Image: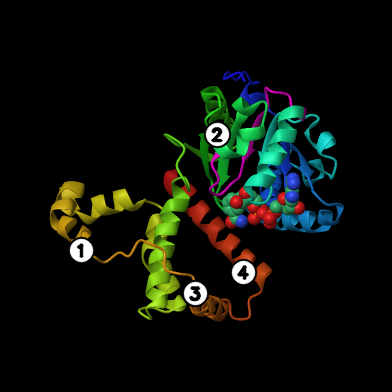
Amino acid sequence: MSNAFDGIEPTAVRNVTCIGAGPIGAGWSAYFLAKGFNVVSYIHSKDEETSLRGLVNDAWTSLTELGLAEGAELARLVVTSDLGAAIKDAEFIQESAPESLPLKQALYKTLGEIVPPNVVIASSTSGLRMTDIQMQCATAERTVVGHPFNPPYLLPLVEVVGGKHTAPGAVQWAAGFYTVAGKAPLVLKREIPGFIATRLQEAIWREALHMIVNDEASVEDIDFAVVNGPGPRWAMMGPCLTYHIGGGEGGMEYCLEQFGPAFKLPWSRMDAPELTPALAKLLIEGSARLAGDRDYSTLNRQRDAGLIAIRKALDELAR
Ligand SMILES: NC(=O)c1ccc[n+]([C@@H]2O[C@H](COP(=O)([O-])OP(=O)(O)OC[C@H]3O[C@@H](n4cnc5c(N)ncnc54)[C@H](O)[C@@H]3O)[C@@H](O)[C@H]2O)c1
């Protein structure tokens, strides 16, 4: 197995193939279309075409509000259930197949044989290691993780990391391509479970589960606290800069002096609690109360409208 990678210039990419027709695969397809690429979407079953096109159309509405690239057209989407045809002209592949290691390993074995070796294959995996995914792939050097945040058509972050057999050049290439495509790639220093953003998210989720199971907070309390407190702040600044400001003129140094002892207090219960049927019931019932009479598509639309407003406000601030 070679450990070098020699791809075309990221700026020269015109043809992108997206594998998978779930929310992530469809979201990526819509995103790349909106950025003016030709997109081939691989559906594993012919029955998925209608739902794929429905998801792409919904995302397109949001993407149009944010502004389409010149020449971007929905008509540039080709849908096929023939994997060979799907990858034929691909210059970049975004894989969003189900989160199952044996499934992804088998898929990368096939892709490793049929996709030219100078084409990067990026996995949307939420937490699997590329070292494991690429185990049966004969051309593993061009396989990387390209983990998006949901919805991939509105949130810029993509966490990029290779596996043991990935060529460093392929990781750099992927980061370069995502930048060209308008995303915010974050190249990880090394392969770590759960990457960075998912780990941060999981830490909050674990604390939420403890408070719910101990009857210290309801599902509603958890969401109310985040939406009215840290959530809006985190749209502009992460926890580090937030603490720096929290220290006033003294910045992070004063913040650490002042709050350092509190960081050691046994507030946090970072191990995940047992997901008992009783806890699951609390979560499911509480979330249903929060959703009220809003169905999935209404919630999706409302989330997208909020994210679009935040993206526009942040763009305005950056000007
Ligand atoms: N849902 C999220 O919030 C989220 C966020 C970030 C990343 N991800 C990751 O993105 C990937 C896809 O997530 P999703 O929620 O869209 O999944 P999903 O299960 O909804 O969709 C998976 C798609 O892959 C297709 N598929 C099934 N078997 C296949 C095969 N052998 N080869 C190719 N395609 C196959 C399915 O038909 C389906 O269209 C997963 O790796 C997941 O971890 C998900």
Left or right: 46 in relation to 111: right
Q: Secondary structure at mark 4?
A: helix
Residues shaded magenta: 114-129
Give me the disc on residue 276: 3
Q: Can residue 89 be seen from the camera position used here?
A: yes
Q: Nearer the viewer, mark 3 or mark 1?
A: 3
Q: Nearer the viewer, mark 2 or mark 3?
A: 3
Comes first in the chain, label 1 or label 4: 1
Residue located 59% across and 67% down the image: 302
Q: Nearer the viewer, residue 297 or 25?
A: 25
Q: Which residue is mark 1?
A: 265
Q: Is residue 1 above or below residue 260?
A: above
The quadrant in which the N terminus is found is top right
Residue located 67% across and 43% down the image: 104
Left or right: 67 in relation to 216: right
Residue 94 on image: x %, y %:
66, 39
Comes first in the chain, label 4 or label 3: 3
Give me the disc on residue 67: none
Q: Which residue is mark 4?
A: 299
Q: Nearer the viewer, residue 190 or 236?
A: 190
Q: Is the C-beta separation of discs 4 and 3 under 8 Å?
A: no
